[in-house]
Amino acid sequence: MLVLKIKQRSIVVHLGILLIFVSKYTNFFRRKSEGVFIDPLQYTIFVYMLKGILFTGVVLMSTTSFSQRTMEKIIEKLSTQDIPLASVTEVAVNPSYTRLDAREKEEFEVSHLPNAHYIGYKDFDTGKFNSLFPDKDATYVVYCSVGIRSGKIAEKLQKMGYKNVKNMSGGIFKWIEEDHPVVDADENETRKVHAYNRIWGLLLSKGEKVYEPENHHSDEG
């Protein structure tokens, strides 16, 4: 009981620190997008501190359902604020939504949501997207591992004139945690899921995790 209380207090303290850094993180990128000069050294130190705190937070919070829900709130905070969030349930019961996968190709080929279209993240092509998806009034839901990358792609789509764009809260990780099916490159149902990296992979308690070599990915989620 004493150990549990100490752990719970550690989580609360860590959450407070992490939330402060999340606020700073969003402020940094808001200022950067507005063209405000940010000292490169200060920014680099801050990013490494954020990664360290985030890693410790994931380790602490991956063991209880309460902590996982709290982590989801933090991920939502890190996501783009101007894009509406769609829950996993909303996406599952609305087959009319066009599902867009904003991860890398190797992640998509391990597994993805049924009927999802690969659009990528680093190699996202606005011209190609316009050609493939000309209907700007349709509803598009973008997802990635946990919702950070997809939020950024969703924001790009919004700026391109797409009127109904949503970011799936919690990403494919949340989809799998809620026992929805995923399919592989041949559209066969699978239990495998690309865990992005070993930090974010701690949030997955279900499915068969697949990893790339260390340092293949950043920590963006």
Image (cartoon, rainbow, N blue to C red):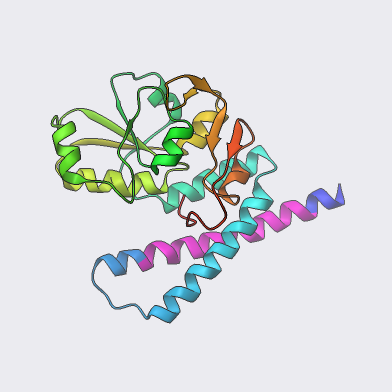
Residue at (23% x, 72% y) in the render: 35
The image position of residue 207, as x and y in percent, is 60, 30
The image quarter in which residue 103 lies: top left
Q: Is residue 200 left or right of residue 107?
A: right
Residue 219 in sight here: yes
**Residue 21 on the magenta span:** yes
Q: Please report the bounds of the magenta region as a residue range.
A: 6-28
Nearer to us in this view, 128 or 87: 128
Q: Is residue 65 left or right of residue 147?
A: right
Residue at (22% x, 43% y) in the render: 157
Q: Is residue 64 left or right of residue 49?
A: right
Residue at (42% x, 27% y) in the render: 185
The image position of residue 3, as x and y in percent, is 84, 52
Q: What predominant SS class does the magenta segment belong to?
A: helix
Is 43 located above or below residue 53 in the figure? Answer: below
The image position of residue 204, as x and y in percent, is 60, 38
Is 152 located above or below residue 165 in the figure? Answer: below
Is 168 located above or below residue 123 in the figure? Answer: above
Pick out the residue farthest to the right. 1
Nearer to us in this view, 34 or 115: 115
Is 102 located above or below residue 214 in the figure? Answer: above
